[in-house]
Image (cartoon, rainbow, N blue to C red):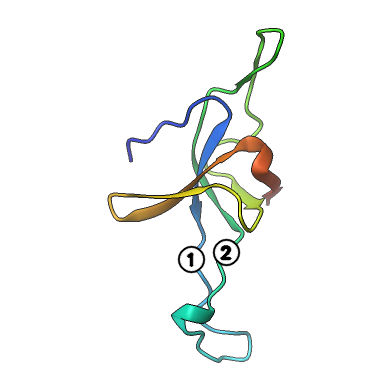
Amino acid sequence: MNLKPLADRVIVKPAPAEEKTKGGLIIPDTGKEKPQYGEVVAVGTGKVADSGQLLEMQIKVGQKVLYGKYSGTEVSVEGEDYLIMRESDIFAILD
């Protein structure tokens, strides 16, 4: 992948949607919800504060993160789906 996010943006590969319910029922494509977590595949350099100082990113490549249902912009690169979002759209880091 040759995407390099700018400033405080992060590129996330969303986790795959659930195929079955916990009870074993198969979920049709129309009933699947978008996952709200994924793995960070690229991060920008950071945000520039009003004072001109560069604020480093807290998120690192490879971390699994939790984000809002409508966060980010969906993009497709080389057949793979990604989300581009600001670091502030990420709610938590999953261990």
Which structural element holds mark 2?
A: loop
Instruction: Give the distance between the C-alpha atoms of the residues marked 1 and 2, in whole angstroms.
Output: 7 Å
Residue at 61% across / 59% down in the picture? Answer: 36
Q: Position of residue 40 (x, y in %)?
A: 53, 44
Residue at 32% across / 35% down in the picture? Answer: 2
Horizontally, is 89 left or right of 24 in the view? right
> Residue 37, relative to residue 31: is it above or below?
above
Sequence order check, earlier mark of 1 and 2: 1
Residue at 63% across / 58% down in the picture? Answer: 69
Q: Position of residue 74 (x, y in %)?
A: 46, 51
Residue with the most extreme left position:
78
Q: Where is residue 47 in the image (x, y as percent from the top left)?
A: 62, 22
> Residue 94, relative to residue 29: is it above or below?
above
What is the count of numbered marks? 2
Q: Which quadrant holds residue 87?
A: top right
Q: Are marks 1 and 2 in contact (CB under 8 Å)?
A: yes
Closer to the camera in the image, 89 or 58: 89
Which structural element holds mark 1?
A: loop
Dot 1, crowdedness within 10 Å: few (<14), some or many (≥20)?
Answer: few
Q: Mark 1 points at which residue?
A: 16
Q: Residue 90 carries which label?
A: none
Dot 2, crowdedness within 10 Å: few (<14), some or many (≥20)?
Answer: some
> Residue 29, relative to residue 84: is it above or below?
below
- Given the image, on which type of amino acid does mark 2 rest? Pro
Q: Where is residue 14 in the image (x, y as percent from the top left)?
A: 51, 56
Residue at 55% across / 33% down in the picture? Answer: 9
Horizontally, is 13 left or right of 89 in the view? left
Q: Residue 35 carries which label?
A: 2
- Given the image, on which type of amino acid does mark 1 rest? Pro
